[in-house]
Image (tube, helix red, strand yellow):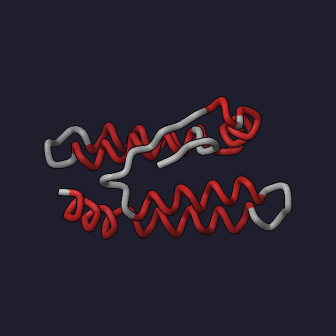
Amino acid sequence: MKTIGNIIWFVFCGLLGFFSYVCLGLLWCITIIGIPFGKQCFKIANLILWPFGKDVKTDFDKHPIANVIWIIFGGLEIAIGYLLVGLFLCITIIGIPFGKQCFKLAKLSLIPFGASF
């Protein structure tokens, strides 16, 4: 299921999300202060390509100030977007695995600093 799910995800969601996060990461990396935030965008972009079979563990306490700054500058809106898409996908039985991946990405998009997968 992981391989088929990853292929379907890549075609319909992964490629667009990957390029979006890479562009966002490049914008963050323009300034020296934004480089850590750009690196987190690249980490999320890596997961967005092939999310099936990976588990996300978040640890807010590792970098609380950076996580709060991330939440203020767009992390909350991205996470809410993934939550809404995940809820929409969970309406049908076929969409439930993809909705679960959206919930995983919402968790990572909300608190990327200190997260591992």
| Quarter-of-image position of residue 63 | top right
Q: Quadrant of the N terminus?
A: bottom left
- Which percent across, then down, holds residue 67? 68, 38
Task: Decide which of 30, 58 is in the foreground and name it.
Answer: 58
Q: Residue furthest right?
A: 32
Tell me which residue sits at (59%, 67%) in the image: 22
User: 59 or 28, which lies in front?
Assistant: 59
Residue appearing at x 66%, y 29% in the figure: 61
For the point 49% across and 62% down, the residue is 46
Can you tell which quarter of the image residue 51 is in? Answer: bottom left
Residue 66: x %, y % from top left: 74, 40
97 or 63, which lies in front? 63
Give residue 87's quadrant in the image: top left
Where's residue 96, x and y in %? 22, 43
Q: Nearest the camera: 111 or 116?
A: 116
In the displayed structure image, the side of residue 65 where residue 25 appears, left or right: left
Which residue is found at the position 21% from the left and 38% from the top? 91
Q: Is residue 6 above or below residue 92?
A: below
Q: Residue 116: x percent and y percent? A: 52, 46
Q: Is residue 11 above or below residue 62?
A: below
**Of all residues shown, which one is farthest toward the top?**
61
